[in-house]
Image (tube, helix red, strand yellow):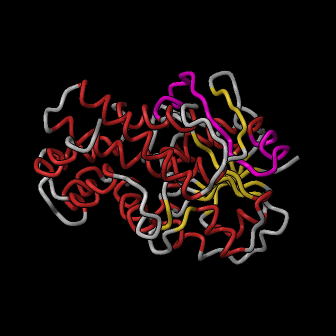
Amino acid sequence: MSKVAILGSGSWATALAKIVMTNEQEINWYIRRQEAIDAFVQTGQNPGYLSNAHFDTDRIFFSTDINKIISASDIMILAIPSPYVKQTTSKIRRSLRGKTIITAVKGMIPDENMIVTDYLAQKFGMTADQLAVIAGPCHAEEIALERLSYLTIGCADHAKGVEISSLLANDYVKTCVSDDVVGLEYSSVMKNIYAIAAGMCQSLRYGDNFQSVLIANAVQEIQRFVQAVNIGHRDINASGYLGDVLVTAYSKFSRNRQFGQMIGMGYSVKAAQLEMAMVAEGYYGTKCIHIANRSMHVNLPIVDAMYTILYEHQSPTIVIQELTKQLS
């Protein structure tokens, strides 16, 4: 049997571990800090995240040594915030030959301006059939509560995708398989940008009517951009794309929406980040998509507006007001 590992210790990593342990007798788990592991073993729950998710820690091999975890595993689920992926993977010294990495990262590598699958392929020479992505509308908090959720597994190798979907399916998680790895990954990055915009507009007292127009235009932006990056057939209205945009833009669990609300209330970026104490992937994704689009010139007015506010420090009130003239 394949041995599965979780790389990361945040809320999404914890939720994915909970899912996998409904199908696997034992898992390996890389957590960076020993004190977090000690607290986890003592209490049976992650000390920092999803405190209502309980684990039988006798079925988990924890380690702060990522190479030990990789050596002991066949399948690794990478669930680390995008700003830290490069730093974390730089520690890998073991061969990844014959191993599979499933990225659950909903962001790009900031320094490299690359989606995670491209970065792993370039850095470690991994082939398309060794890589997969997890996409779709699925908040970690609802997984902890075992509320019905849906995931889309993107993988170039359909048989591998089916294997992974079985690993992540249970009574409260339904899965499907797609071969649109690049489209799903870019959509997962962009939906966080639009969630920031939705939160910002909420604080600026734009109502539900405008929010619906904002998100309708956001989905069109995703379709235009993804088609420019990777021409192919995809149903942008499927849950892996549209569903993920909706839940991230509207849910009370969305940290990107919360981040946007704070910016709309007048917080600086740094102040909002400090108060949240969690990574809002959309902040980094905004710059990455903006830079990537310099050579493609896709019409992305919402992304451009968010970049102007977050990186050029322009007034949200003025920028959003100008944005309203570009939407329909």
Magenta stretch: residue 161 in it?
Answer: yes
> In the image, what residue occupies the spot 67% across and 74% down?
122
Residue 223 coordinates in the image, percent (x, y): 50, 44
> In the image, what residue occupies the spot 61% across and 76% down?
91
Give the quadrant of residue 264: top left
Residue 38 coordinates in the image, percent (x, y): 53, 54
Residue 49 vs residue 178: left or right?
Answer: left
Residue 147 coordinates in the image, percent (x, y): 53, 22
- How many numbered marks are there? 0
> In the image, what residue occupies the spot 52% across and 31% down?
144
Residue 244 vs residue 193: left or right?
Answer: right
Image vertical order of residue 38 relative to residue 177, above or below: below
Residue 256 vs residue 180: left or right?
Answer: left
The answer to which of 301 and 114 lies nearer the viewer is 301
Magenta stretch: residue 24 in it?
Answer: no
- Magenta residues, as a range? 141-164
Position of the C terminus, as image quadrant, is top left
Residue 297 coordinates in the image, percent (x, y): 42, 63
The answer to which of 255 and 109 lies nearer the viewer is 109
Give the quadrant of residue 209: top left
Image vertical order of residue 285 relative to residue 144, above or below: below
The answer to which of 117 and 301 lies nearer the viewer is 301
